[in-house]
Image: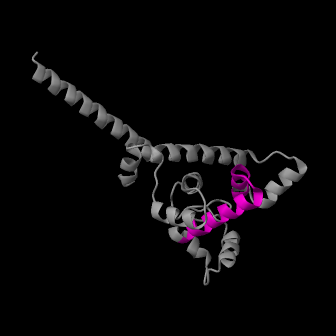
Amino acid sequence: MNRQTLLTRIVRWLLLALILFVLGMAGLKVLCPFPYREAINRWTGEYSTDQFLVAAVIRAESHFRTRATSSAGAIGLMQIMPTTGEWIAGKIGMDGFTVDDLYDSETNIRLGVWYMRYLIDRFGDIDTALAAYNAGPSNVRRWHDTEEEAFAETTEFVRKVRKGEREYRFLYTLPILGPLLRAIAL
């Protein structure tokens, strides 16, 4: 085999390997989708909260479904309870808030990110804030005061969100491939 043919084969194999790698990374992105990125970035910037943490919360809570409603009555992407949504809207001065606004992705993300920041500031660490986000601040306070165990569902939620946060951070900040994955619309 002459040198030109060998070089052509090597280049083809390298291109194939690169294509398979990119497709594999895009496949991983299916597991870590990042829709609503613009709204997430806007509100995490506004309220000094980590975008990857918020994306992981949304994935764990609603799998990015704006019309998601839990059996407990939580609504939207970040699964906000109607009374909590009304309370947050009052705190941030949002006039004319209605419970139906929780189905709007922009509003839901804004309120959810504000609430996440509030809980982080109130409890002082992300894991406790996530537990409060899932089970309510009063349950977290009770668990702390009485040394009770957290609900199994809440413990699993915190684990799942923190794992998701690490996955998002890894996938979307990879040198060279991170910008490529951010550019792939999913």
User: Can residue 36 be seen in the rendering of this structure?
Assistant: no
Q: Is residue 37 above or below residue 179?
A: below
Q: Residue furthest top?
A: 1
User: Can residue 175 be seen in the rendering of this structure?
Assistant: yes
- Residue at image point 66% right, 65% down: 115
Residue 61, horizontal then vertical, whole percent: 59, 55
Compared across the picture, whether 45 is left or right of 90 comes to: left
Residue 77, horizontal then vertical, whole percent: 55, 62
Main structural element of the magenta stretch: helix, strand or loop? Answer: helix
Which corner quadrant holds the N terminus? top left
Compared across the picture, whether 142 is left or right of 10 comes to: right
Q: Residue furthest right?
A: 146
- Residue at image point 20% right, 29% down: 11
Any magenta on residue 126? yes
Total count of labels: 0
Q: Is residue 78 above or below residue 99?
A: above
Any magenta on residue 130? yes
Residue 185, horizontal then vertical, whole percent: 37, 55
Compared across the picture, whether 101 is left or right of 16 comes to: right
Q: Is residue 142 above or below residue 75?
A: above
Task: Depth check: give the residue in front, 177 or 151.
Answer: 177
The residue segment tinted magenta is 107-133
Task: Depth check: give the residue in front, 3 or 15.
Answer: 3
